[in-house]
Amino acid sequence: MRTISMTAAGAALVVAAVAGCGSNAQPIQVNLAASEVLTQAAQKTAEVTSYTVDAVVNLTHPQQGSGKVQGRMLYQSKPQLAADLTLDTVDMGQRSVPGGVRAVLQGDTVYVKVEALKELLGATKPWIKVPLKDADGGSGEVNEVLTQVQQFDLGNMTKLITASQDVKAAGNETVNGEDTTHYSGTFPVEAAVQQLPADKQEQARDGLAELKDIKFDMWVAADGLPRKIALNGSKDGATLDATLFFKGFNEPVSIQAPPADQVGELPKNTTN
């Protein structure tokens, strides 16, 4: 099934780590132009080593119908790349995933827990282990589920937004108890994709191909980091409406692989 991806992904199932060490963020200068704030936000997110994000993504497609993905993710880049994604709602057109989805990334391996996959793939354990190097050759169902992990990445999302040529400040607002400045604008898909590393551009372009200019709103706190990002786009009956809340920058997170006795390998006889 083809879905609209709101962020650039790359060849792996999870976006590459946001590199860097702990941030000693300084308050942003109030006289910065809006475009400079976007650039600074992208730079500062590259220094973030961990965060938590809550997201709601609503999609519509002229042939496939409407869909919704809702969940949260813990992310860390040090001491090794890791992410823990829980999707409470995964509905795509006439299809849904009963019981939701759980995915844990540890280094170069992703562990996936989806009850429906046990029947589809013949798995015998609650969790399926998928090496990232085998991801592109894995089952369509596994790839479709894990693609959602890519949609929660902060670093690449802020890079996309820096392609905006019309961003402007839209006032001061409080987000989850924190004072922020609201910025609003649009970015053209092709120009935004070119802000990403070369190895991530092709998949990003494919994922965003059904949209044209994407409207965004970003709420930035005094440390220069986004606390909320909203994206909206449409083209020929396809629409995207996504809202993400970020918190816990550089705070310790605990991301553990599932117990070994609950993990099985991806069945070898799966096909796309």
Image: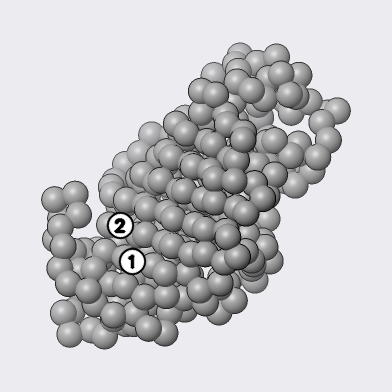
Q: Quadrant of residue 259?
A: top right
Q: Is residue 225 visible?
A: no
User: How far across and down, in percent of the image, does residue 88 sit?
Assistant: 44, 31
User: How far across and down, in percent of the image, does residue 175 sit?
Assistant: 20, 54
User: How far across and down, in percent of the image, does residue 38 sit?
Assistant: 35, 75
Q: At x 36% / y 44%, what residue is drawn? A: 54
Relative vertical location of residue 151 with respect to residue 212 in this rendering, above or below = above
The residue lying toward the viewer, choosing from 94 and 135, is 94
Q: Residue furthest right?
A: 269
Instruction: Look at mark 1 in the image and give the residue it sits on.
Output: 217
Q: Quadrant of residue 106?
A: top right
Instruction: Look at mark 2 in the image and give the residue it sits on.
Output: 228
Q: CA distance from mark 2 to mark 1?
A: 8 Å
SS for dot 2: strand
Q: At x 60% / y 40%, what residue is drawn? A: 93
| Position of the N terminus by quadrant | top right
Q: Of marks 2 and 1, which one's residue comes earlier in the chain? A: 1
176 to the left or right of 79: left
